[in-house]
Amino acid sequence: MSRAILSQDENLSFKIHYQLLPKETSQLDLYFSIPTDMGIDETTLNEVDFFNANIKTHCAYYSEQLHLPLVHSRFISQNKGQKTGYRLNLNLFCYQIRIALDADVKATLQLKEAEIFFPEATLLVEQIQGLLKKLRRYTPPDNKLKSYFQNADNYLSWHTEQAFLKLLANGPKSNDFSEERAILINFCQQENQYRAEQTYNSQVTLEDPNRITNKMKLLERLIEYGVVFNKQTADLTLNVKRMVKGLVTGVIMAFVMFIVLNARTNFQEVTLALITLLGVIYGLRETFKEDLTQWAWRLIQRGRPKWRNKFKSSVSDDIVCTQTIWLEHIRKKDLPKEVVQLLKQRRQQNKQAANLMHFCSKNQVNLSEFLPGYDEVQQRITFNMASFVRYLKKGAGKLYTLDGQKVSKRSVERRYQINLVLRFTNNQEVQLERYKLTMNRSEIVAIELMDAEVSKS
């Protein structure tokens, strides 16, 4: 079973990712239990605004074969395909190198002992040298194709150098491995010199950290062409909103006209009383029209999907995957039984009054087969909690302690805990987990997995 993995992203965001097979369907449900003292409910946090500003979805080809790039040397000969074919194969190769390098660098940084760290780092240098050599073995003579190669080569060289500099900066320090350290430094210097010889970047760009970083971000997006899918988002509530607005307006207008006609028959001529009555009627209409529209729309829309994402291949424009999304504030009685049981396992002091919000994503892969070498696609959903912290109190206080005869004090911050239940259904199996998100006004302090289970439905 493919599992959904939740992890922290940046200071105020977390992400969830999972893999999907051809023609596979799955469903991800997230239930947020938000303490009422955070001041977040349907009146202060609009679901549509939260989705548009703070929830981002991403879908791309995925492979776990991190050390064996999938497209080998097939892209080298431009006779294998047209212009788009060369670019696609080149991007597949480069994207896989980047993913593999990032994963291996992250794994190597987990090694805290120098005796293990430096041999692994030097082995990583050998592997990446072989891959870069394979990339540079052939430079297409066609200028149209050459620009694709130069962009990819420039980005990978820079990204590789940055990755190994990160290894050197954050890895363990030891004087016993000066030779291995010299190998890493020499490799970084070689890549820097290589880009200078190819005149990939101007001196002005190199001297400005912001310019060089932003340029490489642009080149990174260019090599994602054909691998990361284009997203088209459709709002499924537009027609419902129009229908509700028209219906409420019609009902209110009929009621107002009924009152106006009755008032007109009771007044034989235009008087101040008639004008005042008509003013009051139309004032009440404008006052309650929007509230009635919102009430009716929430009543009709409850439980219905709000958005649909279509992920399309940037090469063929085929729809690879469809994602239907729900997001709404719910009541306690709307919680599934298994979610209620999981929330009941909390300690008594944590069972405080809370508002509930539900996010749901139903996924459908449309293709029966993917590009050669890829068996899965990966969906990633990122949640930014910045909209939550605006309602939080600073809550800074003092903690006093007695140390012998001396009283000392320390500043403490106010923290909030959100219970998050994750339910991922895939291949008739259900993954059910409860997380505790501890956050303050500036960051998510911790994400803890409290309870988990996998069952067959």
Image (cartoon, rainbow, N blue to C red):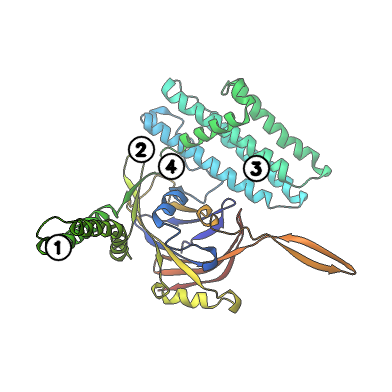
> Can you say whether 219 is above or below 6 in the image?
above
Cα–Cα gap, marks 1 and 2: 67 Å
First along the sequence among labels 3 and 2: 3
Q: Secondary structure at mark 3?
A: helix
**3 vs 2, front mark:** 2
Residue pointed to by mark 4: 227
Q: Secondary structure at mark 1?
A: helix
Residue pointed to by mark 1: 263
Q: Amino acid at mark 2?
A: Val
Cα–Cα gap, marks 1 and 4: 68 Å
Q: Amino acid at mark 1?
A: Ala
**1 vs 2, front mark:** 1
Within-10-Å neighbours for mark 3: few <14, some 14–19, many 20+: some
| Residue 74 visible in rendering | no
Q: Secondary structure at mark 2?
A: loop
Cα–Cα gap, marks 3 and 1: 87 Å
The residue positioned 11% from the left and 64% from the top of the image is 266
The residue positioned 32% from the left and 52% from the top of the image is 366
Q: Amino acid at mark 4?
A: Val
Cα–Cα gap, marks 2 and 4: 9 Å
Is there a contact, CB below 8 Å, between mark 4 and mark 3?
A: no
In the rendered image, which quarter contains the C terminus?
Answer: bottom left
Q: Secondary structure at mark 4?
A: loop
Q: Amino acid at mark 3?
A: Leu
Residue 124's disc number: 3
First along the sequence among labels 3 and 1: 3
| Residue 232 visible in rendering | yes
First along the sequence among labels 2 and 4: 4
- Residue 313 in the image: x percent, y percent? 36, 42
